[in-house]
Amino acid sequence: MRILDEAFIPELPNYYRGKVRENYDLPNGQRIIIATDRLSAFDRIITCIPDKGHILTQTARYWFEETADICPNHVVAYPDPNVVVGKRLDILPVEIVVRGYLAGTTGTSLLTLYKKGGREMYGLSLPDGMKDNQILPQPVITPTSKAFDGGHDEPLTPADIITHKLLTQDQWDTVSRYALALFARGQEMAAKRGLILVDTKYEFGTDADGNIILADEIHTPDSSRYWMADSYGEAFSRGGRPQSFDKDFIRAWVVERCDPYKDDIPAIPAELIEETSSVYRRAYEMITGRIFQPDESGETVLARVRTNLAPYFTA
């Protein structure tokens, strides 16, 4: 299998290795971001999924290009299918999550908090009697921050954000306007593909002039929840969950066999890896309406990436 498990390129400066991306900061204020095929779960890397980095980079590219009229983004160039060269930004300390439905499983999701009896959250008021996965009257922003409680995600209200000086009022107003407009565009375009964009997260930063810029990724199957539109009505009527791009085969397989936070992870079967890769390919094709074409140039994926990044090598 052709995979990109690591992307260390010594000719590039200022190397930083993230969980799934590897970064190089260039002297001109740009950053090279290489998406590997690593799959992160349980606070560790558990395997690699062929084409994952390529698919996520190109899915984000599709959305960056389709939303450039709404909000400036960090993209400068795409020298390789797994690589984006972007402006280096100061990332804002608030994660912006936009939700269109009462859904989710994390501790900060609207549905989780609602089921615990919460009705006032994120500066919002929700009525009694709502059902799992019910559409909200209008999309809402549910911001979180890792600035409190030792680094754990914490729900925030707009007032919290301003009071704690995480953002200025003008920054919050701008980010909110951008996020809701991006989500509206995403929902509109997803609907044409037979998909429901349920919720998503956005990351924003500021450039050297203080302008707010969209960073990271946008509307990918890793940063967003999608449902198949034709499965929603029946699933909602019976209180179930609509069909989605389920990429959690590997996580479920691991949990059944060990404590993934303490034990060694057993070898992942090849068929599970291929099944997950197939889900990513299908997601790309449904979201973009394009056929996925792997780039098999170069002896290896890393060799191809090195060749395409040669113009950025420093003396």
Image: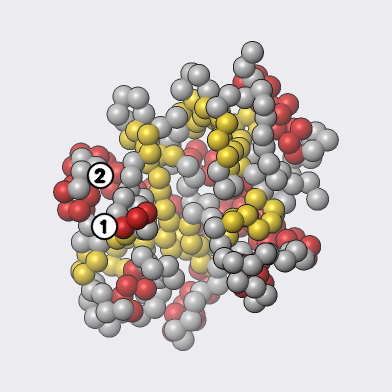
- In the image, residue 157 sits, relative to residue 244, either above or below, namely above
- In the image, residue 42 sits, relative to residue 2, either above or below, namely below
- Neighbour tally class for label 2: few under 14, some 14-19, many 20 plus, Cα within 10 Å: some
- Residue 12 in view in this figure: yes
Drawn side of residue 292 relative to residue 184, left or right: right
x, y percent for residue 266 = 72, 66
x, y percent for residue 248 = 60, 67
Q: Earlier in the sequence, mark 2 or mark 1?
A: 1
For the residue labelled by badge 1, is the local secondary structure a helix, a strand or a loop? Answer: loop
Residue placed furthest toward the front: 262
Q: What amino acid is at disc 1?
A: Leu
Residue placed furthest toward the bottom: 238
x, y percent for residue 256 = 65, 76
- Residue 82, image quadrant: top right
Drawn side of residue 258 relative to residue 210, left or right: right
Q: Residue under circle 1?
A: 156
Tag of residue 172: none
Q: What amino acid is at disc 2?
A: Leu
Drawn side of residue 218 relative to residue 213, left or right: right
- Residue 184 in view in this figure: no
Residue closer to the observer: 163 or 216: 163
Mark 1 and mark 2 in contact (Cβ < 8 Å)? yes
State the scheme by which the image is colored.
Answer: secondary structure
Residue closer to the observer: 96 or 9: 9
Looking at the image, which residue is at 44% across and 71% down? 105
- Residue 221, image quadrant: bottom right
For the residue labelled by badge 2, is the local secondary structure a helix, a strand or a loop? Answer: loop
- Neighbour tally class for label 1: few under 14, some 14-19, many 20 plus, Cα within 10 Å: some
- In the image, residue 66 sits, relative to residue 77, either above or below, namely below
x, y percent for residue 280 = 64, 56
Tag of residue 166: 2
Residue closer to the observer: 7 or 262: 262
